[in-house]
């Protein structure tokens, strides 16, 4: 038994120390018993949830890789020469982005089969939430993400798209992706 | 750490492959990230979902965890298995997230448990009296605890999460300080707050379980 009731309590909670050492220890031990029972139930629920998760999930993996790229993880390791090349590529990318933003562009640009659909909005985050909500209401599992200046959405669409999904896409002027993999990037309108 | 039984995942990432990828960098990083997702996403997501109760937040948090795993890969020395090391990073990330919208619910400084009731808890624990002794009352008490604990989790999610981890892994004071990234003094204060807040939110359960006409 220590002279610190909080220490006794945490010892009881952690399952350390002599049983019934002090009131605080008894209180911690009691809580421990109740929480242990809860953890058993929680473990069962978590295993059921984990079993329902698709693995591998190419969509999820791609989203992770893209995020790693945005965080600079895939460019920051390696030799100094590689670092210089990465820096040069980054500068080139900045130049391209600058050029891109200097020119007027349509609200929606499909850049190719694998390129994300580009949208512009006054409030990109709000539009992202709206589209995600609408896609989910249409039965699509959509995931949102956020980069420095881009709000993004990834979703696997049913093939062929259901009328409800087509309605959502049409509403926002988004062409239906041929492969069912929908990727959207939303930037603030100029 | 409670963790999950090691599910046989095809292409599962082991610690040697992880350390090798960390050293190599380049394309190995991308492969390792994919393997991380295949090996650990489901279990980490289930855990994050239970704590956050929001599927999108949980997905995002696990992804953030994987990014941190890679950012810290050079600190993994391979003395433990990969899973507990990654789960510890998940816990840090969860705590960061839980602290963000912290609702500071005012609570009684002395806690919600009267001295008399605290004494009663102690007396019963010394006598090893099994109360309650009938199944219906056990059920009632379990329900009451569940309800009180849920309110506690909603009001003080970081405190509730840390308390569960202490029960789960028997964390020492030093381990709690490391988890919280706080000084020993600040950690003692956090633990004290855990106890006081739990007393407030679990007061109804204490009363039901141990209260008597004399003490209530």
Image: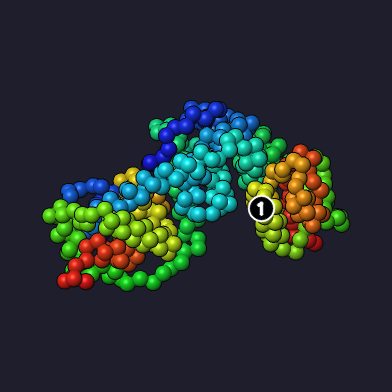
On the image, the x and y values in percent for residue A147 come to: 66, 52
- Give the secondary structure at mark 1: helix
Q: Which residue occupies 67% across, 50% down?
A: A139
Whether residue A51 sits left or right of residue A147 in the image: it is: left
Chain for disc number 1:
A
The N terminus of chain A lies in which quarter of the figure? Answer: bottom left
Residue A115 appears in the picture as rendered: no
Label total for image: 1
Q: Residues within 10 Å of mark 1 (few under 14, many from 20)?
A: some
**Image height check: is B18 above or below A107?**
above
Q: Quadrant of the C terminus of chain A?
A: bottom right
Q: Could you say where residue B167 lies in the image, as x and y percent from the top left?
A: 32, 49
| B124 relative to A140 in the view: left or right | left
Residue nearest the viewer, comparing A123 with A172: A172
Residue at (55% x, 40% y) in the render: A53
The residue pinned by badge 1 equals: A136
Quadrant housing residue B82: top left
Q: Nearer the viewer, residue B134 or A20?
A: B134
- Is residue A145 in view from this perspective? yes
Residue at screen point 65% across, 37% down: A58
Left-right relation of B104 to B188: right
Point out residue A113 in the picture as x, y percentages from the top left corner.
Answer: 80, 40
Residue A92: percent from left, percent from top: 77, 44
Residue occupying the point 47% across, 59% down: B99
């Amino acid at each position: 038994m220590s002279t610190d009731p909080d220490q006794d309590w945490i010892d009881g909670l952690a399952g350390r120390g002599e049983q019934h050492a002090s009131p605080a220890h008894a209180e911690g031990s009691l809580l421990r018993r109740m929480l242990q029972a809860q953890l058993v139930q929680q473990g069962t629920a978590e295993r059921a949830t984990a079993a329902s998760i698709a693995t591998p999930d190419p969509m999820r993996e791609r989203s992770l890789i893209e995020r790693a790229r945005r965080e600079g993880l895939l460019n920051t390791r390696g030799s100094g020469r590689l670092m210089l090349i990465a820096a040069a590529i980054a500068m080139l990318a900045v130049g391209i982005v600058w050029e891109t933003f200097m020119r007027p562009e349509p609200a929606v640009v499909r850049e190719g089969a694998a390129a994300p659909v580009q949208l512009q909005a006054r409030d990109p985050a709000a539009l992202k939430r709206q589209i995600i909500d609408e896609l989910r209401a249409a039965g699509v599992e959509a995931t949102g993400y956020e980069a420095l200046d881009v709000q993004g959405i990834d979703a696997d669409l049913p093939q062929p798209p259901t009328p409800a999904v087509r309605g959502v896409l049409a509403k926002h002027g988004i062409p239906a992706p041929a492969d069912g993999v929908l990727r959207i990037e939303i930037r603030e309108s100029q | 750490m409670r963790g999950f039984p090691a599910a046989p995942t095809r292409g599962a990432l082991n610690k040697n492959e992880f350390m090798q990828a960390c050293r190599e960098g380049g394309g190995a990083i991308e492969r390792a990230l994919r393997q991380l997702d295949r090996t650990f996403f489901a279990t980490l997501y289930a855990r994050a979902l239970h704590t956050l109760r929001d599927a999108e937040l949980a997905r995002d948090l696990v992804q953030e965890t994987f990014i941190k795993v890679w950012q810290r890969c050079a600190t993994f020395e391979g003395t433990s298995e990969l899973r507990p090391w990654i789960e510890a990073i998940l816990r840090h990330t969860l705590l960061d997230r839980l602290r963000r919208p912290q609702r500071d619910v005012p609570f009684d400084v002395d806690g919600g448990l009267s001295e008399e009731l605290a004494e009663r808890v102690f007396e019963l624990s010394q006598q090893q009296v099994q109360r309650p002794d009938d199944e219906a009352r056990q059920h009632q008490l379990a329900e009451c605890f569940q309800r009180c604990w849920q309110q506690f989790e909603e009001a003080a999610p970081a405190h509730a999460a840390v308390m569960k981890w202490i029960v789960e892994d028997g964390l020492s004071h030093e381990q709690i300080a490391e988890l919280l990234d706080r000084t020993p003094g600040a950690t003692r204060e956090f633990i004290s707050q855990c106890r006081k807040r739990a007393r407030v939110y679990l007061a109804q359960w204490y009363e039901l379980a141990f209260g008597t006409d004399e003490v209530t």
